[in-house]
Structure formats: C-alpha cells, structure tokens
Amino acid sequence: MVLLFNTFNWIMAFLTLGVSLAAFILLLAKQQDAHNNCVTFWNEQGGPPTADGSPYHSSVNIPSNQQSIDDYCTNVLRILTIVIGVLTFVGNGIQLYFAAMVGAYSTRLKRFRQHVPLRDLDYMQDKQYTSPYPAPY
C-alpha cells in the first residue's frame, strides 16, 4: 500500500511539474499577444490605474499617453513572468523534495518493517482485560 502511494505521489509530482512548466513556456511564447491585449484594454479604459485609486478621479485619455500605457504593460508582464517563474521552480522543487522524502520513508519502512499496529488485538481479546470505562446500560 505504501509503495502504491509512493508511485502515485511521484506520478502526480511529475505531472504537476509538466503542467506548470508548460504553462510557464506558454506565457513566454504568448508574451507579445498578452502585451498587445494589455495595451488594447488600457486604451479602451483610458489609461492604466493611478496611484490614488479614488473613485471620483479617473485618468484622462491623452494622445501622448500611448508610451506610458506601453511601458505599464511591459512592466506588469515582466513582473508577472518573474513571479510565475520563481513560483514554478520553487514550488516544483519543494514538491519534488517531499516526493523524495516520501519515497525514502516508504523504502525504509518496507526494508526494515518498522510498521507497528496501533493496538494488539490478542491483548484486547484476553479475558483478564477489563475496560477502564463503565459498561453501557
């Protein structure tokens, strides 16, 4: 049973690694499309959000604002790529580490047979054993 769990754990670890790396590579491959969509969105909204965040003030669409929108989208996508890359590699590294620890524990458990049952059923069946709890009515 432990060997089955160990195998399933490794399969899930490598499956998660593959999916997260594929998502990261897809982000890198489609970065220009994401940038174009970001610029289009903020052009329709009138510009990127301002620092004050007041609901009574909104940004004004200025024709020369295109460069600031382009810079804003470039910076946001660069930060997003860095954060997702770090989380992908650190998270998968931690997951593979714990999969290795589970594998080592299951191997040691199987090799040395250190599993101890939670209770001794022969002891429970003994006639001299009395329960510390009163009998139910």
Image (cartoon, helix red, strand yellow):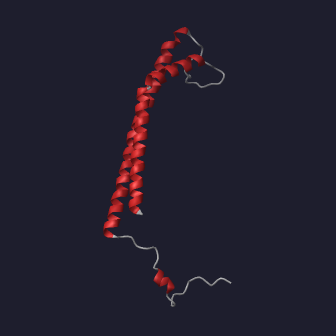
Compare residues 60 and 136 and report the one nearer the observer. Answer: 136
For the image, the number of numbered tags is 0
Camera-side residue of 60 and 109: 109
Q: In the figure, 129 relative to 11: above or below?
A: below
**Quadrant (top left/top right/bottom left/bottom right) for the C terminus:** bottom right
Identity of the residue furthest to the left in this view: 111
Q: Nearer the viewer, residue 117 or 3?
A: 3
Which corner quadrant of the image does residue 21 belong to? top left
Is any part of residue 93 visible from this angle? Answer: yes
Depth order, front residue of 30/55: 30
Q: Quadrant of residue 27?
A: top left
Quick check: 120 above or below 102?
below
Q: Quadrant of the N terminus?
A: bottom left
User: Can you say whether 4 is above or below 62 in the image?
Assistant: below
Q: At 46% from the left edge and 73% from the top edge, which residue is drawn? A: 118
| Residue ranking furthest to the right | 137
Residue 25, horizontal then vertical, whole percent: 40, 32
Q: On the image, which quarter does residue 83 sit in?
A: top left
| x, y percent for residue 78 | 42, 26
Farthest residue to the top: give it. 63
Percent across and percent down for residue 42 are 55, 19
Residue drawn where x is 59% and y is 17% of the image: 44
Q: Is residue 122 left or right of residue 97?
A: right
Q: Residue visible at 49% across and 19% down? A: 36
Lateral position of residue 136 relative to residue 132, left or right: right
Q: Is residue 87 visible?
A: no
Q: Is residue 56 left or right of residue 111?
A: right
**Residue in the picture at 34% in, 70% down:** 113
Where is residue 74 drawn, in percent x and y?
Answer: 45, 22
